[in-house]
Image: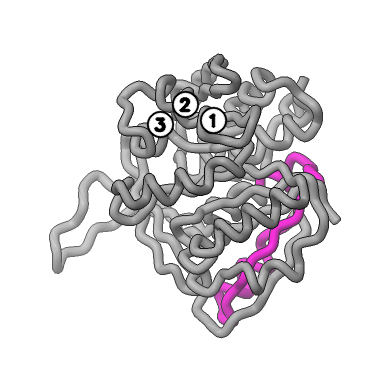
Amino acid sequence: MSALVVLGNVNVDLILGPLQSWPEPGTETLLPQATWRVGGNAGNAAVTLGALGTDARIISTVGQDLPGRWLQENLRGIPVTWVSVPAQTSITVAFTHPDGERSFVTHLGHLNSLCWDDLMPHLLTSGWVLLAGAFLTPRLRQNYPSILEALARRGVQVALDAGWPDGGFTPAVRLEVAGWLPLVHHLLVNEVEACGLTCERDPEIAALRLAEQLAPGGTAVVKLGGQGALAAQHGAVVRAQAPEVQVVDTVGAGDTFNAAYLHALMQGCSLPASVTFGVQVASHAVSSEVRHVLPAALLVPT
């Protein structure tokens, strides 16, 4: 039994860069940096939760291949329940760019098989659940209405970071997500996602609109990259500014924020303190090559 359970996309990340421009078809481009890392929305969050010492567990499928074995060996610091499936392990190639932005190319692999029937028997009683990467777990995404109803019956606090849908936020996708929100307590999105879900240009207005659709007392958090983050709750907005850091790469920064934000809330911190802690930890992450090493001063939020 863990206080927080993470359900979602855990995969291998291959991070290459910096890439100045996309190569022409049939040509080759040499890049100076390459890093293998535990990745995915859920995987990045799990690494941070382990570093923070959060009482958390992750449940995920994994492929029966070399990348799958590598993934199991390298996700440390947090208990993991692996459900082995006869599929290739998912790999994402992340290209960093000189301006700090990134682009992703993903082979879904084992994430295609991630479903509620496989995960439910391993889901012990917990007070919090983070649903991560809905749009990269197609079968689990289909189960979201049933998952959310089951968690609501148990009185679980649900946090959701669905990620970016292939094809963008079409009217159909917005309608689908709107059906999930009344059973979500903490919606964790970036600025582009918030505006895509609401068709608003101002992230603060988008956050206020999204918060109105959540479970009573729910919080909509919008991650603003180098500008920090904001959170809307009960018609009010709180903001946390990001410190100035030397950006190494931004892959997984939002997922790192999610973990730190939830960690602080679970310690009984206020909403402003939790948003600030999330921003601090994520800011350190983007300035560090080794994501699971965090300054000791950040380990206990106040």
* Segment colored magenta: 48-76
The local secondary structure at tag 2 comes to helix
13 or 241, which is in the foreground? Answer: 241
Q: How many marks?
A: 3
Marking on residue 54: none
Which class describes the residues within 10 Å of circle 2: few (<14), some (14-19), or many (20+)? many
Q: Amino acid at mark 2?
A: Ala
- Label located before the other in sequence (2 or 3): 3
The magenta stretch spans residue 65: yes
- Label located before the other in sequence (1 or 2): 2
215 or 228, which is in the foreground? Answer: 215
Side (left or right) of 59 relative to 212:
right
Q: Amino acid at mark 3?
A: Glu
The local secondary structure at tag 1 comes to strand
Q: Is residue 239 visible?
A: no
- Label located before the other in sequence (1 or 3): 3
91 or 4, which is in the foreground? Answer: 4
Residue contact between numbered discs 1 and 2, judged by CB atoms under 8 Å? yes
Q: Position of residue 65 (x, y in %)?
A: 56, 81
Q: Amino acid at mark 1?
A: Ala
Looking at the picture, the colour scheme in use is one colour
* Residue under label 3: 191
Which quarter of the figure is the N terminus placed in? bottom right
Above or below residue 259? Residue 273 is above
Residue drawn 55% across and 23% down? Answer: 231
Residue contact between numbered discs 1 and 3, judged by CB atoms under 8 Å? no
Marking on residue 207: 2
Which class describes the residues within 10 Å of circle 1: few (<14), some (14-19), or many (20+)? many
* Residue under label 1: 220
Above or below residue 236? Residue 105 is below
158 or 253, which is in the foreground? Answer: 158
